[in-house]
Image (cartoon, grey):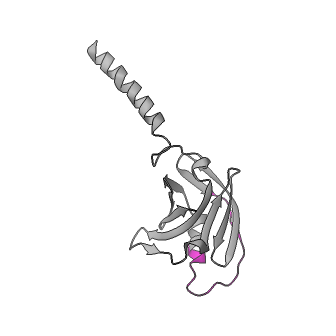
Amino acid sequence: MNRLVAFGIIAVISVFGSACGENNSATGPSTAARLEGNWALVAFEPAVGGVEAVDDPQAYTIEFTSEGRLGMRADCNRCASSYEAQGLDLSVGLLACTRAACPPESRSDDFIGAVSGASSYLRYDKTLFLYYEGGRLRLQQN
C-alpha cells in the first residue's frame, strides 16, 4: 500500500510540476504561440564548424504571426510565407521573396535557404533556434 501512495504522490507532483514550469522550459508549450513575435538573427551555427556571428542582426529578421504567416527581411530582400508549428516541428511554406542584388558579403541567400528548409525549432526564453539540414539559426527576440 505504501508503494501505491508514493506512486500517487509522485504522479501528482509530476503533473503539477510540469504545468507550473511549462512557460519557462525550453520544451514548454509547443504551439505556434511560442514562435510569435519579431526575431533577429544573431548567428549561423553550422552542424560542422564554428559559430558564424552576424554583424547586423537587424538586417536579418523574421516576424511570426498568430495567423500562421511569417515575414522576413533578408538583408536587401523581403520574403513572406505561411508556416505551421506542430509540437517542436516546423514547416515553412514556399517563400515569396524579392530578388534584389545584395552586396557580395550578404548572407541573404543563406538565411532564406535556412529558413525555407527549417524543420524544427526550440525556444528558450528570448532565444529561438531554427533547425535546418545544415545546422541551426540562433535568433533573439526584438
Which residue appears farthest toward the top when viewing the image?
Answer: 1
Number of numbered callouts drawn: 0
* Residue 13 image-quadrant placement: top left
Q: Which residues are magenta?
A: 92-110
Which residue appears farthest toward the front when viewing the image?
Answer: 142
Residue 25 rendering spot, x and y as whole percentages: 45, 46
* Residue 108 image-quadrant placement: bottom right
Q: Which SS does the magenta portion mostly show?
A: loop
Residue 6 versus residue 48 in the image, above or below: above
Please tell me which residue is depicted at 36% across the width and 20% down the height of the picture: 8
Residue 95 magenta: yes
Quarter of the picture containing the N terminus is top left
Please tell me which residue is depicted at 54% across the width and 45% down the height of the picture: 30
Residue 19 rendering spot, x and y as whole percentages: 48, 34
Residue 10 versus residue 125 in the image, above or below: above
Residue 103 versus residue 90 in the image, above or below: below
Residue 22 versus residue 48 in the image, above or below: above
Residue 123 rendering spot, x and y as whole percentages: 50, 53
Residue 119 magenta: no
Q: Nearer the viewer, residue 88 or 52?
A: 52
Quarter of the picture containing the C terminus is bottom right
Q: Nearer the viewer, residue 97 or 51?
A: 51
Which residue appears farthest toward the bottom when viewing the image?
Answer: 104
Residue 89 rendering spot, x and y as whole percentages: 54, 51
Please tell me which residue is depicted at 70% across the width and 81% down the height of the picture: 100
Q: Nearer the viewer, residue 56 or 35?
A: 56
Please tell me which residue is depicted at 68% across the width and 52% down the height of the picture: 68
